[in-house]
Image (cartoon, grey):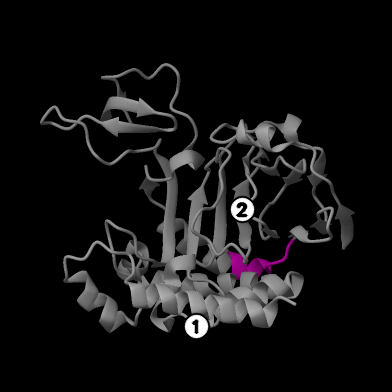
Amino acid sequence: MKLLKLNPILNEEQISNLKGTFFNKDLIKYHIKEDTKIVNENGDILAVYKKNAVPKEVVDKCRNAFRKSISVSNNRGQAAGPIPDYVKIGDKLDGLTVGKINGNRFYPLLSTGKLSKSPKARAVKSSIIGFSDRYPRIPYCRRTMFTQRNWKQYNQCLPYIKYVDAFFKQHAPARYKIQKKMAEQSAQDFIIKDTAFSTVTVNKNFRTAGHYDNGDLKEGFGNLGVISQGQYDGAITVIPKYGIGLDLGDGDLSIFDVHELHGNTETTTKSYYERISVVCYYREKMIYCGNAEYELKRAKTNTKKVANEFEIEKAKKIKESILDECVQ
């Protein structure tokens, strides 16, 4: 495996200016198409890329299940990209009437004439499988909608996810150890069995704009795989701070620091293609979850708190203990 040691090529102001924008190939200095480990100026892992990391028979067995999981979402925020300049107040966007535009989001106009309190992003093909943590609007841990309604198909995805887990363990063992221990200390009803992951985002033909993966464990890593068919160019995953372009195809895997700004280049094709990206991670607030019985009881209350003081303090101590053990 090739080794690259890189220094930043963009400063923080330049990186900030790229948030929420679509990336082009001009940002790529290092186009990664062969097995490569990339470290930063301090020797810390930035990314690992490997071709054909998942055997074809595993990819083919899981392909239809991942495909079935995909739905249309307007909740991808900054990653969905900017609202087009031609869209004005009162126009229809993805079937909704635009009442107010705020950066990469818009507030739909309700039938009552009032603005919705829930901002929307551009509609993209993206879904979540596995498990979701608490947040104010839904303050209980749970299976994602796809997992709840399609348990058989969810289980058909697991062989692929376990290959990703093994890849993570092999190529970033220090980060993996922290993330796996956090997963082990979490309620197992909300962890993907025998992995360091709680959650998987599945995208189809989705060109993401520059974004950070908020909510993932900061000391962990994002794990990206691609399942694709047909011929196309582009869809390169770019980390502009270091000029990295990860060019993933069918069966390829990469781990990288998703807390660095990243996004994709445009895809071009002259025929049908399908590019499904599979992103495996651990949601940091999963450590708050009780078991399924406890979370079901919580769902029946009117609480709006993501966690109570006891849960917050307990989670803090668990994480501190794990970091003390794993970080020398």
Query: Which span is picked out in magenta?
Result: 52-59
Residue pictured at 62% horizontal, 55% vertical: 226
Q: Amino acid at mark 1?
A: Gln
Left or right of 94: which side holds 29?
Answer: right
Relative to residue 203, is residue 119 depicted above or below? above
Q: Quadrant of residue 99?
A: top left
Q: Looking at the rendering, which quadrant does residue 251 occupy? A: bottom right
Is residue 206 shown above or below 252? above
Residue 59 falls in image quadrant: bottom right
Q: Is residue 6 visible?
A: yes
Considering the numbered disc 1 on the image, is that residue within a helix, a strand or a loop?
loop
Foreground: 70 or 187? Answer: 187
Residue occupied by mark 1: 185
Q: Does any portion of residue 50 appear in the rendered image?
A: no
Q: Looking at the picture, how far across and down is residue 249, in whole percent?
A: 68, 52
Q: Residues within 10 Å of mark 1 (few under 14, many from 20)?
A: some
Q: Nearer the viewer, residue 178 or 238?
A: 178
Q: Position of residue 25 (x, y in %)?
A: 72, 32
In what quadrant of the picture does the N terminus appear?
bottom right
Residue underneath mark 2: 259
In primary-sequence order, the first of circles 1 and 2 is 1
